[in-house]
Image (cartoon, grey):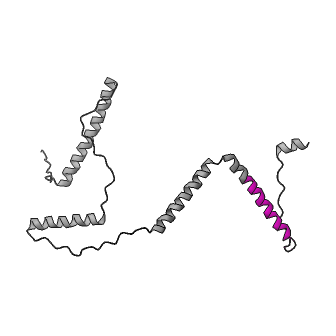
Amino acid sequence: MVRTLKTMPIKFNTEIINAAIEGFESQKRRIDDQIAELRAMLDGGTKPTATTPEAPTGKRKKFSASARRHMKEAQHRRWAKIRGESAPAPAMPETSKPKRKLSKSGRKAISEATKKRWAAFHAAKTAPVVIKKTAVKKAAVKKVAKKAAPVKKSAGKKAAPKKTAPAPAQPGTETAAQ
């Protein structure tokens, strides 16, 4: 006795067809890549295949609100024309803000500040680096001396001044002292 299987008829809808197309295209790309590799092994170089180039994916262009509104109105007019309706009147004309202007004094202040910044930049660029380092060291020594002086004056008012550990001796100074 032979059994036969009864299968349900397959209904093809757009989702199934699109999925099949995508699957076949990916298989085609994979096969084309393998063919290109094999040709490279034979010839020692690659040859361009006749595959369709994929479109580069970039960022979407963003439209301004007014541009989107104009597109919307144009689309509504097209739909109304197809349906045979009269074109709808624009709802409210948009009042635009007056363009802001910079006063002469504001423009002058910005110009002077910019010139001052550039002058400082160019002056810093031409100054030698060695002088900067020595100036920083001298300033640091002066700050330390200034900080130490007030502590001694206020020692009578407070219970005890802060004690600091002695600075470690440098190896070069010990040999010179001996």
The answer to whether residue 13 is left or right of residue 40 is left
User: Compared to 9, does 95 lie above or below?
Assistant: below
The chief SS type of the magenta part is helix
Q: Quadrant of residue 104?
A: bottom left
Provide the residue span drawn in magenta: 136-159
Quadrant placement of the N terminus = top left
At 77% across and 56% down in the image, what residue appears?
A: 141
Q: Quadrant of residue 138?
A: bottom right
The answer to whether residue 125 is left or right of residue 145 is left
Question: In the depicted view, which residue is nearer to us: 74 or 161?
Answer: 74
Residue 131, given in percent of the width and then of the height, sits at 70, 48
Question: In the depicted view, which residue is nearer to us: 124 or 176?
Answer: 124
Magenta residue check for 155: yes
At 82% across and 67% down in the image, what residue appears?
A: 151
Question: In the depicted view, which residue is nearer to us: 20 or 68?
Answer: 68
Quadrant placement of the C terminus = top right
Q: Quadrant of residue 146?
A: bottom right
Magenta residue check for 142: yes
What is the count of numbered marks? 0
Residue 117, given in percent of the width and then of the height, sits at 56, 57
